[in-house]
Amino acid sequence: MELLIEYLSYPFVRYAIIVGVLIAFCSSLLGVTLVLKRMSYIGDGLSHVAFGALAIASVLKITNNTLIILPVTVLAAILLLAFGKNAAIKGDAAIAMLSVGSLAFGYLLMNKFSTASNLAGDVCSTLFGSTSILTLSKESVLLCFILSIFVVVVFILFYNKIFAVTFDETFAKATGVRTGMYNLLIAVIIAVIIVLAMNLVGSLLISALVIFPAMASMRVFKSFKAVTVSSAVFSVFCALAGIIISIIAGTPTGATIVACDAVMFGLFCVVGAIRQ
Amino acid sequence: MALISAKDLTIGYSDLVLYRDLSFDINEGDYVFVIGENGTGKTTLMRTLLGLRKPLNGEVVTDGLKLSEIGYLPQQTVVQRDFPASVKEIVLSGFVGRLGFKPFYTGKQKKTALEAMKRFGVDDLASRCYRDLSGGQQQRVLLARTLCAATKVLLMDEPVAGLDPFVTEEFYGLVEKLNREGMTIIMISHDIAAAKKYASHILHIKNDPRFVEKNEYFASGEGNEFSILAENGEG
């Protein structure tokens, strides 16, 4: 406990907690939509693209690498969505190619051009986010903050349309909703969330942050609103618990958060089974 | 002028023409059964009437009918079966086409949604989860949602598929009541007996589709033949 209080006196730890909570909050919002629209794999693919973009940014020695990663990931999201509709290249195959392709190129670039002394450590922390959340600069914290607020505001404003498009796209389209535009919006928000979440848990563990809260809440709650609220609370709680445990026990932050998510998911499953 | 006019429609996909030169007029208050074997292009026609896809040739003319006055009851999707949403949320989403740039539903829309739920007897299920309902209840919920969207025309794609005979009869009763109140109904169905009972017109989809008044259809040799086929479970 003393250790925790001592750590909390450092501003970077406080930043980490604020940003962590915000990111966890955002990433849980679209979980239900992604899972039900069978789009959860898009999140996985995009996170690998983000890794590739990060490699490029670090080779180019750009200090605020979000400025590169964000546009590249958003672009990839839009392309994947377009590919998904194209029967010639199956959506999931396209994603698999894009994701392993960018992983390979990302690692190649880092390996060949990186000047850092501890290459393996660098790669590991991008993939698993081992310490990155604690080393965020003040600018990155601000950027994360702005992006999180953006995601939350967009989600609230379009909540009803996102619900309609998720539940029954054909019906929504037939009554005059521009579903193509909303699918695009969903893809862009996912891309933003991925870029945000990469700071928290690293690119390999992002999907966990998106999927665990939604899957857990869907087992217990019976309305879309309740599931959404529960996902958000679930995600924020796990992020907080994960960060605090990682500080006290000295474990990697990202992996600890995801471990908390997994344990909580198990709990929710039990609760869901009892309620049945 | 007719509410919905199809003019020389050619329906199909880029490499496959299903049928050509289909013209018909649907007037206000009509109850049209769209029948025909599987794969003949009934759903495709319905999607064309709704403007969800373009016909290969010809056009659909609607007389001042806005998209937001048409309700569509599509075939159920796999996604919906385990969707965590309450009945109330789903019925209310019928108004989504009328939201425009507004983010939230109005109090009046919520009231209308409640009335639609009452009408189909699902108001006491309002906070129940959609995936926990029976097939018949789910279909009534979707009908209530469609009613929120539709003020003039209802298009339904095999609404009674998978329902037991009792629930099916009940469903037809609800639809007939809507029709008597002036709602135009266009329904895809394999249920020839119901078509004989409720339809005003029959649209038989095949290589050479026909749109005729019901009695005329069933009096014709073709209508007779198809209904015998259908009743033997081959249609």
Image: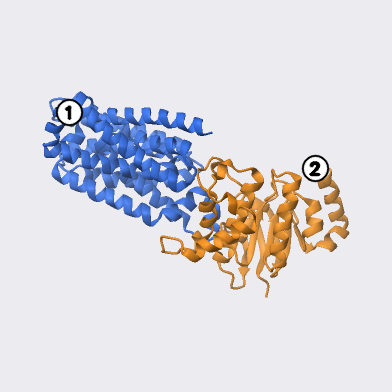
Q: Which residue occupies 59% across, 54% down?
A: B123
* Type of amino acid under label 1: Met
Circle 2 Cα neighbour tier, 10 Å, few/some/many (<14 / 14–19 / ≥20): few
Q: Name the mark nearer the viewer: 2 or 1.
A: 1
* Type of amino acid under label 2: Glu
> In the rendering, at what x and y percent does residue A42 appear?
40, 39
Alpha carbon distance from label 2 to label 1: 75 Å
Which quadrant holds residue A117? top left
Q: Which SS class for mark 1?
A: loop
Circle 1 Cα neighbour tier, 10 Å, few/some/many (<14 / 14–19 / ≥20): few
In the picture, which chain is orange?
Answer: B
The residue pinned by badge 2 equals: B234
Q: Which residue occupies 43% across, 50% down?
A: A183
Q: Chain of mark 1?
A: A
Q: Nearer the viewer, residue B225 or A249?
A: A249
> In the rendering, at what x and y percent does residue B91 appear?
55, 55
Is B67 displayed left or right of A49 in the figure?
A: right
The residue pinned by badge 1 equals: A1
Q: Chain of mark 2?
A: B
Q: Which residue occupies 60% across, 66% down?
A: B151
